Amino acid sequence: MPSLVVRNLDESIINALKARAVEHQRSTEAEHRAILAEVLMKPKRKSFAEVLSSIPAVGTDEDFQRINNDAGEANVFD
């Protein structure tokens, strides 16, 4: 299995990694591997445009027209 060496890390990063490893009851090296896997192997998020384009085209514009019906009702919460 390949290895990865990370040099010149700030001491605060090392301390945070060690604290997180203790929190998850694993070695610092195992925690480092878990963080890398969590961040790099998760599925790519869809962009807003991709989500919008995946919505099926149903109905016509007339089905979604707003009808302004202000007749008589001053406040619906009264």
Image: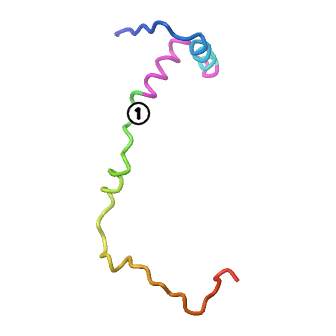
Position of 22 compared to 44: left or right?
Answer: right
Which sits in the foreground, 10 or 53? 10
Q: Is residue 24 magenta?
A: yes
Work out which quarter of the rendered image holds the N terminus and state it.
Answer: top left
Q: Is residue 43 above or below residue 7?
A: below
Name the residue: 60% across, 20% down: 20
Q: Residue 34 appears at what percent x and percent y?
A: 48, 22
Position of 20 compared to 55: left or right?
Answer: right
The boundaries of the magenta stretch are 23-39
Q: Is residue 34 magenta?
A: yes
* Residue wearing tag 1: 42
Q: Residue 27 appears at what percent x and percent y?
A: 56, 12
* Scheme of colours in the image: rainbow
Work out which quarter of the rendered image holds the C terminus and state it.
Answer: bottom right
Q: Residue 40 appears at what percent x and percent y?
A: 40, 27
Name the residue: 51% across, 10% down: 9
